[in-house]
Image (cartoon, rainbow, N blue to C red):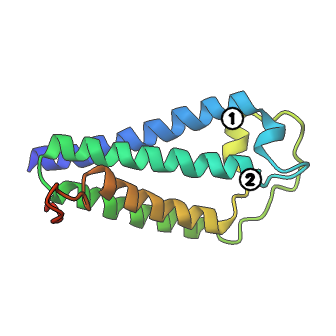
Amino acid sequence: MLRAFASVIVGYIVMAAIVMISLTAIYLALGTDRSFEPGSWTPSTLWIAIMLIVGIIAALAGGWSCKAIAKSAKPPRALAGIVLVLGILMAGMTLGKAAPAEPRGSEVSNLDAMNKAVTPSWVNFANALIGFAGVLVGAGFGKERAGGAKQTP
């Protein structure tokens, strides 16, 4: 039981660390102007694509690490469910979020970018679904054996 609980916690921490470290580094490399639409707090198409790719990688790694620690199928399913529920809740909280009153300057700190960006709602909901599916795939659900039969984790 403790192993299962720990595997879910570690899987979530792995996901969060990959997202935070990667997106911070990429934001610093791209800069404000390439991360946002011109003069706006809306993330650029490039930034949205990067976010989705990092989300996929993080979810795969989180699912894999959860399964590696747990050595059973239930904890990764629990992690996938937690990621989906939290993702939908967080996406729901951003519905109707208005852009900050002050205009976006040419240089925005990473913290201000995270707090003030107005990400399209579809991206937030897509991240929840990507996280859910990525955890399951990372944990090995859906893999096929050499004989063609689906493997039951």
Residue furthest to the front in view is 147
Q: Dot 1 corresponds to which residue?
A: 27
- Rendered-image quadrant of the C terminus: bottom left
As helix, strand or loop, the secondary structure at mark 2 comes to helix
In the rendered image, residue 106, in percent from the top left (x then y), is placed at 89, 36
**Which amino acid does the dot numbered 1 rest on?**
Tyr
Q: In this view, does 116 lie to the left or right of 26?
A: right
Question: In the depicted view, which residue is nearer to us: 137 or 73?
Answer: 137
In the rendered image, residue 126, in percent from the top left (x then y), is placed at 54, 64
Task: Please tell me how crowded label 1 is: few (under 14), some (14-19), or many (20+) other residues with Cα within 10 Å.
Answer: some
Q: Dot 2 corresponds to which residue?
A: 45
As helix, strand or loop, the secondary structure at mark 1 comes to helix
Q: Tag 1 or tag 2, which sits nearer the N-term?
A: 1
In this rendering, which labeled residue sits more in front, label 2 or label 1?
A: 2
In the rendered image, residue 105, in percent from the top left (x then y), is placed at 89, 40
**Which amino acid does the dot numbered 2 rest on?**
Thr
In the rendered image, residue 141, in percent from the top left (x then y), is placed at 25, 59
Q: How many labels does the image show?
A: 2
**Residue at coordinates 80% horizontally, 37% vertically from top-left?**
32
**Residue at coordinates 18% horizontally, 63% vertically from top-left?**
148
